[in-house]
Amino acid sequence: MSDSDELEIERKYLLKSMPVLPERTGRRTLTIDQGYIPGERIRERLRRVEEHGREKWYRTVKLGKGLARQEFEDETSGEIFLAMWPLTLGKRLRKRRHVIPESGFNWEIDEFLDRPLVLAEVELPAMDTAVTVPDWLTAVLDREVTGELPYLNSTLAR
């Protein structure tokens, strides 16, 4: 999503615990540090992503709430990330994200490292796309929390 706006459509689910993750081709595990810059009208997020010992940095602006919203994301440099990171003090979170390909979608299981919380997300191509929760996830599924304020990453950041 570089240099253009894109509609982000995703559903989010609260899990009772970490599921047993299936082995899949394309499965990935990332460690994410993310923080939010205070603002009244827009939400700007900084994110450091580590995978296989390599880091990447991103700046993201999100507009809107709920199932669908606009997202503007650009990769940035470590220098810019480090210069801006102090602005996020008090609005940060840390999580391990497991990306699991399933039936044409990528399910993202976020295991929060700074609190006992596990969430699942799936990005969709359209708002009316039907979602079938995979069998490996149903055993630990609590409920859908799409758009619920307490489960927004910007709310969870502390």
Image (tube, rainbow, N blue to C red):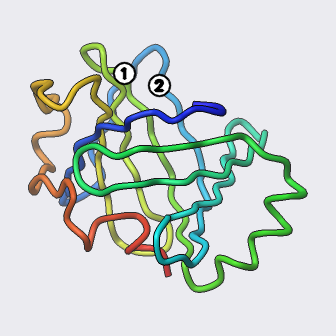
Q: Where's residue 25, x and y in %?
A: 46, 14
Give the percent coordinates (x, y) of residue 63: 42, 54
User: Which quarter of the rendering shows the N terminus?
Assistant: top right
Give the numbered dot on residue 101.
Answer: 1
> Where in the figure is residue 99, as x and y percent of width and height?
44, 33
Note whether 39 is above or below 81 in the view shown: below
Vertical comparison of 135 with 157: above or below: above
- Residue at point 90%, 57% (across, down): 79
Q: Depth check: 17 or 36 in front?
A: 36
Q: Horizontally, is 5 left or right of 79 in the view?
A: left
Task: Using the image, determine if residue 15 lies above or below residue 26.
Answer: below
Amino acid type, label 2? Arg
143 on left or right of 25: left
Residue drawn at the location 58% of the way across and 60% of the way down? 45
Residue at x-position 39% and y-position 23%: 23
**Residue identifier under label 2:** 27
Seen as rendered, the residue at the extreme front is 41
Task: Mark 1 and mark 2 in contact? Answer it, CB < 8 Å.
Answer: yes
Instruction: Give the Cα distance between marks 1 and 2.
Output: 6 Å
Q: Earlier in the sequence, mark 1 or mark 2?
A: 2
Q: Which mark is residue 93?
A: none
Residue 73 sits in quarter: top right
**Mark 2 Cα-neighbour bin, 10 Å: few <14, some 14–19, many ≥20:** some
